[in-house]
Amino acid sequence: MKQQPVRRLRQEMMNSFTINMTRLKKSIQILLLLLLLAWSAQACLPGKRLARHAVGPADTISVCLIDPVFLYMQNMKTWEIEGYDSIPENQRDSVAFYNSLFLKKVDDSLFVNRYTQTIRKSLQALHVRLYTADSMDAFLASGGQLYLFNIAQMSLEEYVEPVKKTWALDTSLYWEIWCNAVGFNVWYEASVLNDTSRKMEVLFGNMYVRDNVKGRFFGDFAAGDISYYYNLDSISLQSVYNLAERAGQTHSEYIYDYILNDQMKRKAKSGSPPAEYMHYDPIKKTYRKAGTHRFMVVK
């Protein structure tokens, strides 16, 4: 048998060793990644497990939702009104309102009704026992945990804001398109009536709708002669009413999550660290960390 030179054998052994080490490193990296994923999943389990068992049978929790008495509407685009600064101060809000594009057309009762009815429909779909101000006596006599959500204030604001479109190949090149927008703000007073240790909290939520910009960049990219052409899909009165329903759906989830997380605190073991604020997805029927998908606690 013909023998291979010793130098060649050593080189092949070194190559084989290098290949095996590379494979070993990749295997270790994969193993570490799997362990990290497993640890992350386990870390989420206590919060999810607690959330699943936090809200008990429907007869143990009652919710009373009190409608607002008024919808404030304010046109922020006062700079469009000629001679605005010379208008008497006590008349400025009215003048601005009648110079608005959308607010002056909004039926405030219809907007509020769409918002509150969407909330009630969504909460009832989650099997929440729901009451109104007219059924307060029944609410107080219902037993279990009593959650009162008073819509203390609601407002609609009409304004403009810039939408920035940046060229992907050069972020220093961008266009700003000023768009009309309508923002909806709501403040809740949340109380747990039969728990003297709990203070009333003020919760804030907001949503908005604005013109939709659709466009693209054109020109001689090499020479830097570039323009942005776009179409503006303007918001309409129907868009504003749709905003009421979108906000109602979202805020119904926020209300449910508020109850869910309050119940999680009550059922957590004494001395255990605070759990992550959880969100229940009514469509997927799953629990996850809420992140910013929640009411802001004002005080």
Image: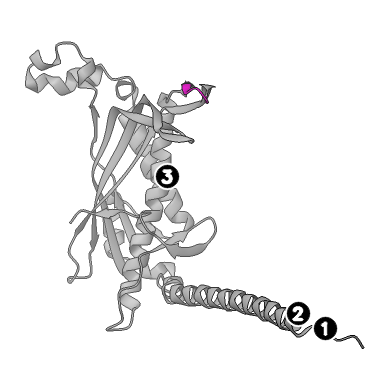
Q: Amino acid at mark 2?
A: Arg
Q: Amino acid at mark 3?
A: Thr
* Membership of 223 in magenta stretch: yes
Q: Position of residue 144 (x, y in %)?
A: 32, 71
Q: How many marks?
A: 3
Pointer 1 residue: 4
Q: Position of residue 271 (x, y in %)?
A: 27, 83
Is residue 231 in view?
Answer: no
Q: Quadrant of residue 238?
A: top left
Q: Which mark is residue 118?
A: 3
Of labels 2 and 3, earlier in sequence is 2
Task: Write the start and end of the magenta stretch as one range.
Answer: 221-225
Of labels 1 and 3, earlier in sequence is 1
Q: Taking 110 as reference, is 145 above or below it?
A: below
Q: Position of residue 92 (x, y in %)?
A: 14, 20
136 left or right, relative to 254? left
Q: Residue lying furthest top in this view?
A: 82
Report the mark closest to the observer, 2 or 3.
2
Evaluate if marks 2 and 1 touch, with contact meaning CB atoms under 8 Å apart.
yes
Report the mark closest to the observer, 1 or 3.
1
Q: Amino acid at mark 1?
A: Gln
